Amino acid sequence: MQSSSSEEILSVSSSSSSLSRNHNYGPELVSTECMNKLKALQIAFNELESQYFKSVYEFEYKFYQNCSYLFEKRTEIINGKYEPNEEECRLRTDFIDTTDQASPSANDILGIPMFWLQTLKQAPVIAEMIEEWDEPLLTCLNDIKLQLQLHPIIGFTLEFHFSGQAKQYFTNETLTKFYELQIESDDQVLFYEGTSIIRSEGCRIDWIDSTTNVTRNANTGERQSSFFNFFTSPPLHEQWKLATDFQIGHYIREHIVPKAILYYTGEIFDEYDFSDEDLNQQEISTIEQIGEGTHVTNN
């Protein structure tokens, strides 16, 4: 059998496409009653899907309650309040079985100095927020905690706990950022896409004086770029700032808090073998995901 030439294939494809255009099978030929029934089914599906996402969030809440002791132990080790014994320092995985990877000089260091500063600077989404004048204050960061909330408002709070050394900058012991989540679907809306962040609320930072306020230029007093601007609630009418803020909060929740040690060492990037282009695309993808009315999922 003689095979068809590429010209013949293109001709057939063109004819088929033309045929489709000439015969209108669009929704305008379907009765309104039928279309409304299909939309009602979609709304019913959306309601069931929202119940599913709510169950997932309730399960996540219980999960974090169960593993909170692991984060507490991590905090104690980082801040030198607990020194692991030799058996606890033995790392056993499918690939590794080691007991001592530390250098001799490191044995005299209590805890892990500047752990959270290093961790945040390793995350591309966060690193670009950190300025030179932020770093001395971020060395005082003792812990980043995640608190999930079910009632009365569904959401989560990021808590940044600082050591006493931070008192030379501000009087707060903890800085917080709360994110409200919307899980329930609206039965009047067909385009439900799952859990979404709809609002964030920062906290007041009680700076000692204008010279310690790193969000203001020391000479002019004008607002300047700073990591600590993160704790300011973004204006609701500025969609880009909202999307960026939601992106950062989601990233800290899903990546930094549970996987801090992998960011600190940089092994998180070895695992996924990210290139600079991949990391930039990941940031863009995250912004697109966490815009208004979109899913809040892991990347």
Image (cartoon, rainbow, N blue to C red):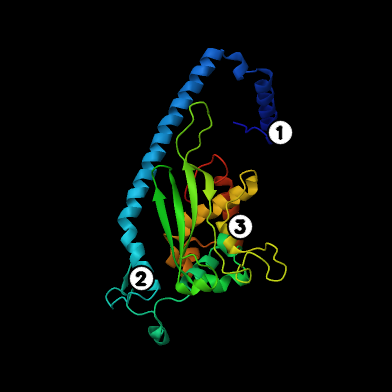
Q: Please name the residue that numbered disc 2 is placed on.
A: 76
Q: Residue at x 53, y 68 (%)?
A: 170
Quick one: label 3 or label 2, which is nearer the N terminus? Answer: 2
Q: Secondary structure at mark 2?
A: helix
**Disc 2 residue type?**
Glu
Task: Please state which of residues 6 and 141 is positioned toward the viewer in this rendering.
Answer: 141
Can you say whether 175 is above or below 114 in the image?
above
Tag nearer the camera, 3 or 1: 3
Task: Please state which of residues 214 and 41 is positioned toward the viewer in this rendering.
Answer: 214
Q: Residue at x 28, y 77 (%)?
A: 85
Q: Estimate the spatial distance between the alpha carbons at disc 3 and disc 1, rounded to whole Å.
A: 42 Å
Q: Is residue 275 something one can see in this rendering?
A: no
Q: Please name the residue that numbered disc 1 is placed on.
A: 7
Quick one: label 3 or label 1, which is nearer the N terminus? Answer: 1
Q: Position of residue 44 (x, y in %)?
A: 44, 26
Q: Give the number of callouts.
A: 3
Q: Please name the residue that numbered disc 3 is placed on.
A: 280
Quick one: label 2 or label 1, which is nearer the N terminus? Answer: 1
